[in-house]
Amino acid sequence: MAGLGKGEAYSLAAAFTWGFAMVLFKRTGESVPPMALNLFKNTVGLVLIGATLWLIGDPLETLTRMSRREIAILLLSGVIGIAVADTIFFAALNRVGVGITSIVDCLYSPATIFFAWLLLQERLYVYHYAGAALIIVGILLTSQVEPPPDRTRGQIVAGVLLGALAVSLMAFGIVLTKPVLNREGASLLWCAGVRFLAGTAALAAFVIVTPQRSTLKLAFRPSPVWAWSLPAAVLASYVCYLFWMAGFKYAQAAIAAVLNQTAVIFAILLAAVILKEPLSARKLAALALAVGGVLIITLGEQLRTWYVRLAG
């Protein structure tokens, strides 16, 4: 551990906080519907990001330097990646639990690579396909896990499909924002704030005009549920995000990404300890395949470079 730099430490902290938040959200989701829980989480994140911008004195002028097109992209990304994707993600979490959802979450890497190739013309190599194949096999393996006592196999399959859709939408939303984030002088906090605002506003508008509005009091009214939902919202929408930024700032991107994906391991282990979710041999095998695929995708470029050097 002597060689662990602060960037790597931040990345591990991001993975741990996200894994912990997933466990807390699962406990909260037992009594709060997905839309209400998602709106609550987004509101907490929006307030905390806004408070941080005010405390550090990041001026509104930073936002005004962005073009209308850039702001539109961030708004669309927020609606897709926060309002829609997160709600579907929570619905999947309620159906299949933390363990299976964590493995399905590994689809994020190949989905991001695919959309980066499609929208940004980033090049794909053989190792991308190999890693994606391992992840997909791991996800398919989770659909064969014995369902919890109160879930049917059909609900498990539906949960896996919902989780895959949610992760794909998250990846698409993030890839949309990449050109904006790469612009010189772009503020990560302002970009995050605009996305949170769009996602929260879209979700709130939808919930208010549907029967789901009656469930809002379950999330926003102070109650014993807050013992789980409030810490989960703070961890997921604020603490994890700041650790993620710091990790990518101070560590190599590939190393930070690998360490971030250890959230899968943290979530499954924490779910086993806190929620008493079983660690079956099939689930562990699926986890190993998924994590292996993530490692291949993330470290493949370094391995390819080393091979070319040795071959030359």
Image (cartoon, helix red, strand yellow):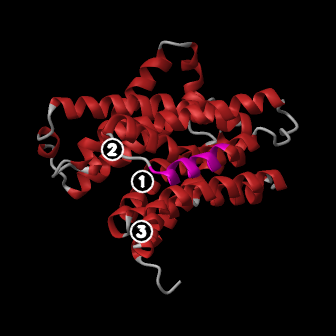
Crowding around mark 2 (Cα neighbors within 10 Å: few <14, some 14 to 19, many 20+) is some
Tell me if residue 180 comes above or below residue 253 in the rendering.
Answer: above
Please provide percent x and percent y for residue 212: 57, 19
Alpha carbon separation for disc pair 2 and 1: 9 Å
Quadrant of the image for the C terminus? bottom left
Crowding around mark 1 (Cα neighbors within 10 Å: few <14, some 14 to 19, many 20+) is many
Please provide percent x and percent y for residue 28: 65, 41
Provide the residue designation for mark 2: 192
Q: Which mark is residue 308?
A: 3
Residue drawn at (40%, 24%) of the image: 202
- The amino acid sitting under disc 3 is Val
Please provide percent x and percent y for residue 174: 39, 41
Please provide percent x and percent y for residue 33: 63, 29
Tag count: 3
User: Magenta residues, as a range?
Assistant: 125-136
| Left or right: residue 69 compared with residue 312 | left
